[in-house]
Amino acid sequence: MAFKGTLREFKVPDILQLISLQKKTGILTFTSSDGFITLIFENGLIIGVDAFPKKLETRVGHVLVKQDLVSEEMLQRALVIQKRTNQKIGEILLSMGLIGKETIAEALKNQAIEVILSLFKWKKGEYNFKIMNSLDDSLRTIDPIATDNLIMEGVQMLDEWPFIKELIPDDKLIFEPIPIETKNIEITLEDREEIQSEDKISISETEANILKYINGVNSVKDLVEKGVFTEYKVYKSLYNLIKKQIIKRKGTSKTDKLDDALFEELKLGAESRVRNIFRVFLLIFMVLFVLTFFKPLRPFQNDNLVTDSALFEIKSPMVQD
């Protein structure tokens, strides 16, 4: 048994909530022109995730390298072994003694959540849920994830994303800390409401962890690719830290402001010159247009002058014999 449809008819949060509430077991596949994402459910919980073209294990391997937990050389060696044995990357790295089981599990969970949240941005596509009585053990790739919190986070992400992108429009931006006395910063729990005061700045645990990687070198893209948090949490944390004046864009100083002002002045001057040139060309065009089609000089052209000999008779003087 299965149910399927398009994302125009049924949105991602509704599909996930329905499967969760009914505690269904089966395989849910989303497809679009860009690829597909597969979610494995058991009793309404997500126990497996995969994606194409960028598979989950490829994401995890890339993240482990970015976090300096394994080297690129060792990852490539593990990929060679995988082609030969068809084992999971995590299992290979574990057997090689390069990384711990908990580290692998955490990396898999973070990347799985990243993949699931990316679904909320899909505008077009199709879904197909195949209901099953039982699942093969090979499909269980991550620790069970409840969908309730994911749905809330995904909906919140869609609401806040436009405001975040206004402040952080480019993932190539680099931020650096603003010098602040550490005693003036208070770290609060994620679910606790932050209270700001004149002598204390309150930040969440996630923001505090992101702050560790903000060093004037790492770009926004680097922070996302480290895989410590999902893309949304990285952007939201940066947004909050900017608003709280704890970090700033690298190079934003008085000198930079003067440079920006000079650039703006030169830009305005160039735009003014372009407008003036355009006006001159427009004037020339109008003059040529009038001369071509209306011919105001027509009465003075030679071929239009009256030259009838009956009207203009030229008499020569008579010669006397």
Image: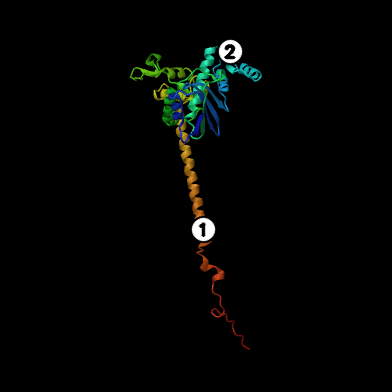
Mark 2 secondary-structure assignment: helix
Q: Where does residue 277 sit, x and y in percent of width and height?
A: 50, 47
Q: CA distance from mark 1 to mark 2?
A: 80 Å
Image coords of residue 267 (percent x, y): 48, 38
Most extreme residue toward the left is: 198
Q: Nearer the viewer, residue 45 or 103?
A: 45
Picture quadrant where residue 244 is located? top left
Percent of width and height locating residue 108: 53, 19
Kind of residue indicated by mark 1: Phe
Relative to residue 160, is residue 188 depicted above or below? above
Residue that badge 2 annotates: 94
Residue 262 in sight? yes
Along the horizontal axis of the image, is 72 left or right of 300? right
In the image, residue 319 sits, relative to residue 162, either above or below, namely below
Q: Which residue is mark 1?
A: 289
The answer to whether residue 217 is seen in the rendering is: no
Which numbered disc covers residue 243?
A: none
Say how the picture is coloured: rainbow
Helix, strand or loop under label 1 = helix
